[in-house]
Image (cartoon, rainbow, N blue to C red):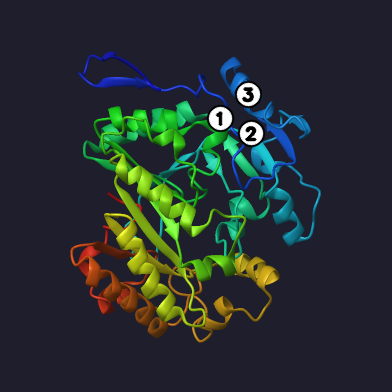
Amino acid sequence: MPKVEQPNLFGATVLSPSLPTDYEPVRPAYFQMSRVFLTKGSVATPERRRFVERICRRYPEAPVEEHLDTPHNRIELGERDPLSLHRRGKQTLVFGELKAAVRFSQERGNACPNYWHFSPYGFCPYGCRYCYLAGTPGVRFSPSVKIYVNLPEMLAEIDRIARRQETPTAFYLGKLQDSLALDPLTAYSTVLVPFFAEHPWARLTLLTKSAHVDRLLDLEHRGHTTLSWSVNPPEVSAMFEENVPSVDERLEAMRLVAERGYPVRAIMMPIIPIDGWEEAYTAFTDRLLQTVAIQRLTLGCICIYRSARDLMERKLGMRNVVSEHIDTTSLKAGDGRTRYSRDLRHKVYSLIIESARRLRPDLEIALCLEEQALWESTGLVASIGRCNCRL
């Protein structure tokens, strides 16, 4: 919980968060961790050392190596083949600090409205075969699962930014990681949710595929924390999402937090046109909306950089349903990513929008990382800026 101090000279309440202390780490599902690295800054204070040691004790079989002069992104994992490196990284936990953890996105060449995001974690233990994170520069050469211990400093920076805005401002956790996959180990949610609940301007949005919501259920959130789940029909998840909570588990987690009053959203991305995709996505859209009273649905197709596509094709083979639908006539859109053809994207989005509108005519629907032309052709142009990562 954040400590709440007296108002300062300017009348603003000062929030002083700390790392979680009074809790027992739990080994999270879907993380088969085999070794630990302590890097620069990870145990630089007694508070950080106690936090790190508490988590390490949950894995007595995993060797711990100290590299206290090495930054978190310079750890050698002992693999040269990209796919072997990727797999080794998924079983490696690195503790460190991330100095520039609070950032404003700088998307160009699409209609993304840009947003504030922050990173108390890096990467993710899940095994989605289409993973776009795997090809980003920050992950490609150092694909380990990371816990950054300078959470209090991140929240202090969020506080400064939000007070300058003087308007409710979303801070998104999920752009470069899964927001809840490691929460059983860190209990970061027990600091984050109360911090944002108390803050006059800052609001939190969490994106996850996790079902680890136990720590959230009894927290006072005041509606300042929004939970968003990445979902796809079970048929798609079974084909492309390895070592990931099932769709049933995710829907149950969504239902539980919605019962506790949290605003809940869903994002279907990447939509993948498998055989029979029309029936699969229509049925799943109906099931989603009948199971959880989501406030917003965001849709997105594959949008992938070359390095991430190379790794995806190492996992799936060159001839796979994703690659076969990528538009090869114009290899890059304005933002440098490859996508399906505009005609296919329009068809996919229109079908899901129509399915959703039948059940929830008033549901907010938006697109993710899409071109202006697709917002216009699907009739959603008025919703630009009302997508998953924004208030």
Instruction: Assess whether mark 2 and mark 3 are in contact (beta carbons under 8 angstroms).
Output: no
Q: Dot 1 surroundings within 10 Å: few (below 14), some, or many (20 or more)?
A: many
Q: For label 3, count other residues whose C-alpha is less than 10 Å away and answer few (under 14), some (14-19) or many (20+).
A: some
Q: How far, Cα to Cα, is label 1 from label 2?
A: 7 Å
Residue named by callout 2: 95
Dot 2 falls on a residue whose secondary structure is strand
Dot 1 corresponds to which residue? 149
Left or right relative to 337: residue 307:
right
Q: Residue at x 71, y 29 (%)?
A: 69
Question: Which residue is label 3 attached to?
Answer: 54
> Of the residues shown, which amino acid type is indicated by label 3?
Arg
Tag in front: 3 or 2: 3
Which mark sits nearer the N-terminus, 3 or 2?
A: 3
Q: In this rendering, does residue 98 appear at all? A: no
Q: Nearer the viewer, residue 54 or 145?
A: 54
Q: Amino acid at mark 2?
A: Phe
The image quarter containing residue 343 is bottom left
57 in relation to 78, above or below: above
Pointer 1 or 2: first along the chain: 2
Q: Amino acid at mark 1?
A: Val
Q: Quarter holding the N terminus?
A: top left
| Label 2 Cα neighbours within 10 Å, binned few <14 / some 14-19 / many ≥20 | many
Give the image location of residue 126, x and y in percent.
60, 53
The numbered disc on residue 355 is none
Q: Does residue 182 appear in this view?
A: yes
> Marks 1 and 2: CB-CB under 8 Å?
yes
Q: CA distance from mark 3 to mark 1?
A: 13 Å
Residue 235: x %, y % from top left? 52, 71
The image shows residue 357 at horizontal and vertical percentages of 23, 70
Q: Is residue 60 above or below residue 379?
A: above
Q: Is residue 205 above or below residue 68?
A: below
